[in-house]
Image (cartoon, rainbow, N blue to C red):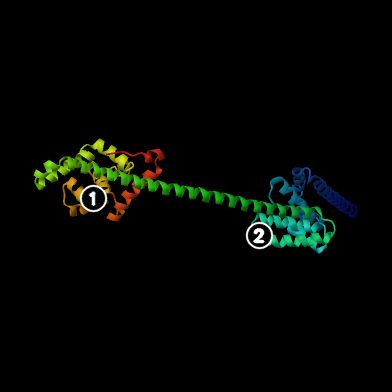
Amino acid sequence: MPIKFAIILSLCVLLAACSFTHTNETINNAERLVNTAPDSALYLLETLLADYNDLSDQEKAFFGILYFKSIYKVDGKYPALDFIDHSIDFYRSERNKYWLPQALFYKSMAQKQNRSYQNTSIQLFETIEYTLYISKKTLSKLQKNILLISFSSILTILAGVLLFVYFWRKWKMVQSKKEELLNQKEIQLKNKHNLMYQELLSRIRELQEAQAKERKKMTFAQKKQADIEIYKQVLVYDKEDLFLEKMNRFLNQLPDTIKHNFPNLLYKDIVWCCLFLILPAREMALIIGVQENTLRKQKQRLAEKMNFENNAEFEKYLSEAVLKVSLNANDAKNANYHKF
């Protein structure tokens, strides 16, 4: 019995020794491969995960650094902080001034990845402190990486700011030109409407003067009917196709816009809107055949039919519709002048 026990104990010790040697060899192989073949290094390290708790503290510490480094090189991301925390605790307790800065650096990068910027700053400052302690004359490879990262970050931020300023100023210039163009078009539009309105009045007076002799003999009712005929001759509102064509040219496609936005309106409703924009209330009432005070009631009913809350909104819509269509239309088309 004592002999068997001694044999079993010897086998256990031998197996443990073999396992210890294999673990050291695996970590050493991973260290040799981590820079040139990180995927192979990661594969070797992952074979040790099942036996991680059986590793010595020193092996766990070195394992954590190699594991962090290989995963980052393969996936571009850092794993959980458990392994690297053990590395930091071990190398800090051992006052190891070579491996501790690397462990702190990897942890700071992982915290940056997790957007823990305050902890990232603390770890980075501690990393720099330990790194400077290593050598006051020669920068280590880790220090160069940190400086390179910082310098690259500054250049990236500076380039971003310069690009933002450039595109912002360019956008402001474009907006300024657009506003200037809109203002010019609005002025052209108003001049065009004034010119056409004067042409309309001139045409009406011309026809009235042509009837001057006859009008002297007319009664008030006859003159009123003669004026209606003149307006009908000039505006051709009794001929739907001709009137809509004339008003589309005169009011920059307003009839088409109203028909598109309010398909439930009748032709007489569109006539009312157009006459409201181009004629005084007296002449408009004459053409429609109502009293001037009746126009307000008609305007209110039409505003309700078009789902406006009040007359002011209705009038604003008509004015802005003319302007909007004109500003969005072709420039050459807007510049055309059409006589009545």
Residue at (80, 52) in percent of width and height: 141
Near-viewer residue (14 or 208) = 208
Quarter of the image with the N terminus in it: bottom right
- The residue nearer to you, when weighing 317 against 87, is 317
Is residue 318 visible to the viewer in this orientation of the structure? yes
Report the residue marked by disc 2. 117
* Residue 37 x, y percent position in the rendering: 77, 42
Report, in whole angstroms, how far the alpha carbon at label 2 lies from the one at label 1.
Answer: 70 Å
| Nearer to us in this view, 29 or 284 | 284
Helix, strand or loop under label 1: loop
Image vertical order of residue 90 relative to residue 192, above or below = below
Residue 227 on image: x %, y %: 16, 44
Q: Is residue 194 left or right of residue 12?
A: left
Asked which secondary structure carries label 2, the reply is helix
Location of the C terminus (image quadrant) = top left
The residue labelled by disc 1 is 280
Question: Outermost residue, right direction?
Answer: 3
Could you tell me how many numbered marks the image carries? Answer: 2
* Residue pictured at 68% horizontal, 52% vertical: 155
In the displayed structure, 305 sits above or below 236; it is: below
- Residue 74 in the image, given as x and y percentages of width and height: 71, 45
Q: Earlier in the sequence, mark 2 or mark 1?
A: 2
Marking on residue 266: none
Dot 2 surroundings within 10 Å: few (below 14), some, or many (20 or more)? some
Label 1, residues with CA under 10 Å away: few <14, some 14-19, many ≥20: few
Q: Quadrant of residue 329?
A: top left
Mark 2 and mark 1 in contact? Answer it, CB < 8 Å: no
